[in-house]
Image (cartoon, grey):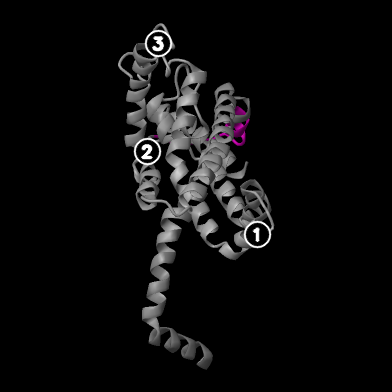
């Protein structure tokens, strides 16, 4: 009894500390833990907004694995990942290597490269819609009216392959700046003495990159790779705005198909099942 009273008095004495701890814990439980467990729960139901929901067991998960459009969505997501991740890493590394040199205006160029990163996905998506518009797009104008490479305006967003190309191009362009900053920080952490000693021994620029830069930046490269892969599977806004998943759901990615089912068709249970599958796989 005395121990309990002592503990209570100790808690009361330090109540301001426990309040600061409890507030973020309550917010975390409300806005993170509760939605997670609610999603897991809803995945086993034919969930209705109005009226009673029916327990269907694993039906939503079975339907998900048999859904042809979800298979297309997974395929498109993988294509997007395979296109954007290497593209961002290669161009970001080249930009970082160039901007790591002592050149005039490098702060300006760093800002230019990073500007797309801080620009809203909505804004850059509408910019690309304008650029690749089939009638009044700048790309068609350059290719047809200036360079005369094509004979008629091309519908970039009207077919699956070209629309995915545009979306991948947008993903690469928008993400280069973030990867470049991380690579640049890694490059600047490498002592100049290592490069100077290697140059004295007759090492070329290529040898410096593969023998010194790459090994010393291995952890940085792995970090960027992992983060880009995670980010590529979270692609949603650009696809939703540029194509809406069309034509005929052929450019759907996992998150747009999840959104379409959950909030377009109000198949909330099925959408929850897709979310769970995406989380674990």
Question: Which dot marks residue 121?
Answer: 2
Residue 266: image quadrant is: top left
Q: In the figure, is residue 42 to the left or right of 23?
A: right
Above or below: residue 196 compared with residue 159: below
The reply to whether the magenta stretch includes residue 39 is no
Q: In the figure, is residue 8 to the left or right of 278?
A: left
Name the spot of residue 82 as percent of width and height, x first: 59, 34
Name the spot of residue 112 as percent of width and height, x first: 36, 44
Quarter holding the C terminus is: top right
Which circle's residue, 1 or 3, is located before the other in the chain? Answer: 3
Gap between marks 1 and 2 measured at Cα: 47 Å
Q: Which residue lies furthest to the bottom in this view?
A: 2
Mark 3 touching mark 2, by CB under 8 A?
Answer: no
Viewer-nearest residue: 196 or 159: 196
Q: Is mark 3 on a helix, strand or loop?
A: loop
The magenta stretch spans which residues? 51-63
Q: Is mark 1 on a helix, strand or loop?
A: helix
Mark 1 touching mark 2, by CB under 8 A?
Answer: no
Which circle's residue, 3 or 2, is located before the other in the chain? Answer: 2
Gap between marks 3 and 2 measured at Cα: 32 Å
Above or below: residue 115 compared with residue 144: below
- Residue matched to label 3: 148
């Amino acid at each position: 009894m005395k121990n309990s009273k002592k503990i209570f008095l100790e808690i009361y004495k330090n109540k301001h500390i426990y309040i600061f701890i409890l507030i973020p814990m309550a917010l975390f439980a409300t806005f993170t833990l509760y939605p997670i467990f609610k999603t897991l729960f809803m995945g086993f139901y034919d969930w209705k907004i109005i009226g009673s929901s029916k327990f269907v067991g694993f039906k939503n998960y079975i339907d998900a694995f048999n859904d042809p459009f979800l298979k297309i969505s997974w395929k498109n997501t993988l294509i997007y990942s395979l296109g954007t991740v290497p593209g961002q890493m290669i161009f970001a590394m080249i930009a970082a290597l160039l901007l790591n040199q002592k050149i005039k205006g490098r702060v300006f160029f760093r800002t230019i490269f990073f500007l797309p990163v801080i620009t809203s996905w909505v804004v850059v998506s509408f910019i690309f819609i304008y650029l690749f518009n089939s009638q009044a797009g700048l790309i068609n104008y350059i290719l047809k009216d200036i360079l005369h490479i094509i004979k008629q305006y091309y519908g970039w967003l009207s077919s699956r392959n070209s629309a995915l190309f545009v979306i991948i191009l947008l993903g690469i362009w928008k993400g280069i700046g973030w990867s470049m900053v991380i690579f640049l920080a890694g490059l600047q952490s490498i002592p100049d003495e290592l490069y100077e000693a290697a140059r004295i021994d007759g090492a070329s620029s290529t040898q410096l990159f593969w023998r010194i830069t790459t090994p010393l930046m291995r952890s940085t490269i792995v970090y960027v790779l992992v983060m880009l892969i995670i980010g590529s599977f979270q692609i949603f806004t650009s696809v939703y705005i540029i194509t809406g998943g069309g034509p005929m759901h052929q450019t759907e990615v996992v998150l747009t198909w999840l959104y379409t089912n959950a909030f377009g068709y109000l198949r909330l249970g099925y959408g929850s099942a897709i979310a769970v599958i995406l989380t674990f796989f």
